[in-house]
Amino acid sequence: MITKLLTHLLELIWRKLPGLTLIVLLGLTAPCSGDFEPSQYKWYKNIEVQTPMNEVIASAQFDSQIYFSARKYFPGLRIIDNNNAEVPYHIEQSINTQPRVIEQLCRSEVNSLRELPDNKIEIIVQLQYGDLFADGLTLITPQKNFERRVSVFGSEDGINWIEIVSGALVFDYSRYMDVHNRRIDLPKNKFRIFRLEVEDVIDERASPFRNLWLKLNDKTELEHIEQFSIYNRTFRIDRIDLWRNITSQQFEKEVKANYPVVDFTVKEDEDKKQTVIEVVTHMEPLTSLGFVTPDRNYHRQAHIEVKRIQYGNEIWIEIGRQSLLKIQLQGFQQKNRFIEFPEHRDKIYRLIIDNHDNPPLKISGVEAIGNVYEILYLNKAENNYRMFYGSETAEKPKYDFANVLNSMRESVQTLSASLSEEIINPEFNKESDRKSFQFLENKWFLTMITALMVVVLGWVVYSTARKI
């Protein structure tokens, strides 16, 4: 009996459900067309390429106007020829091939070491058979907190010497910051024997421990004496590495470009002891940000933040952190003023510098570096081409040109093309660039529709149950 009642109930629900289903389907579907509609695109650029005599692959790099107007993954781009026909294309990151230069250790040995007047030592190092030249040397030492001058002489026979480096500075300032240099670059040479003269090999150091004597009379201090010790420290060298630069196999490297910054503001957060630089960009695919300052001899930690929406609230998240420094001491220079991070396309970034107890840096500018993207298509000599963009609703087209491109790269010539200045599309119609049933994207509307469906379905079940 119960089985028959349930079967009858389901049959009645099914009779009423198709009408409800049809209503829902009509509301949730939107017309879709793959045809190119010029009125959906705000701007276009003419693609300028030297007129070829036959078909070639044309490649045009994007500019800041494209990045600012194109959405993520560039869905709203179309290439149209002079017959208003849509032309398949492929977008890829620009890559170039460069040789890789690496340092290779040379086989060498120390022939002699002797003391010289004026607190110097002389070290003679010779390349072993088979190693023809050296581009530099490194002093391997376990010592910290030192500063030494080294002169290098070269010889072919060990008798006649020519000075090739005069008073190069090697140092370690670990006591103050993580800055050191133990390398000496050599000019181009054909010497096989090198003589190093190291100055000030023995220096005087104050002991960190002090002796204190107090003379007291009824707990009253009568005399206060402090003594500290001075000791001699010898500069120890474990070994000397000679090395040369060699070019290995070629490798592919991402093409980088300097992009203009729209605006930036600098604020000092005295409570957190930070300098906050807010940077506005054209949403280029950035991979590093850096600042310009006339200050020098600094070493600061800094990080980059971008804005995101989380649970309906705006928050700042960190995307990159790095040490920024600029050291200029007696001819030695070491600097890094850029923070690298994975590629991001955001309008606003925050560059935050931790000052601690140091005075804030004077920020005079901000620089942005990022990847370069290019669009490739098959260019015919008799056609002219335009690239339309700026649509908020156009879907990403599905072409098989990427597979075709891979098979023809080696046999078909590739020419560099350029994009003209931005041109306003006179056919653009804001209404035609709106999605059909755009209100369906509103979460409150979807919530009401869902609640209404639940109420209607509950009424159907209730009325059907009463009839049974």
Image (spheres, grey):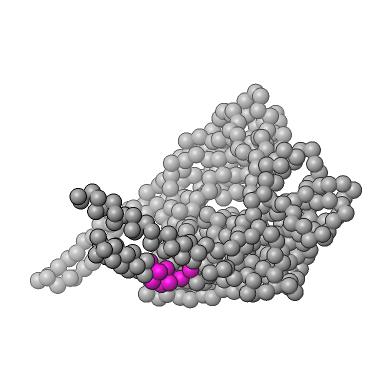
Q: Is residue 31 left or right of residue 133?
A: left
Q: Quadrant of residue 460?
A: bottom left
Give the quadrant of the C terminus: bottom left
Q: Closest to the observer: 60 or 153?
A: 60
- Residue depicted at 21% across the width and 61% down the height: 213
Q: Closest to the observer: 61 or 51?
A: 51
Q: Can you see residue 306?
A: no
> Does residue 153 sit above or below 312 in this rendering?
above
Q: Is residue 25 left or right of residue 288?
A: left
Residue 445 sits inside the magenta stretch = yes
> Does residue 208 sit above or below 264 in this rendering?
above
Q: Closest to the observer: 425 or 422?
A: 425
The x, y position of residue 403, in whole percent, is 68, 42
Q: Magenta stretch mostly in which secondary structure?
A: helix
Q: Closest to the observer: 248 or 407?
A: 407
Q: Specify the farthest residue to the left.
A: 218
Q: In the rendered structure, which segment of residues is drawn in magenta?
A: 440-450
The x, y position of residue 467, in whole percent, is 26, 63
- Residue depicted at 60% across the width and 61% down the height: 32
> Does residue 261 sit above or below 188 in this rendering?
below
- Residue depicted at 46% across the width and 65% down the height: 23
The x, y position of residue 384, in whole percent, is 83, 59
Q: Can you see residue 342?
A: yes
Q: Is residue 210 left or right of residue 132?
A: left
Residue 446 sits inside the magenta stretch = yes
Q: Is residue 352 left or right of residue 193?
A: left
- Residue depicted at 77% across the width and 57% down the height: 85
Task: Give the tally of numbered discs.
Answer: 0
The x, y position of residue 30, in whole percent, is 55, 63
Q: Specify the farthest residue to the right.
A: 53
Q: Quadrant of residue 217?
A: bottom left
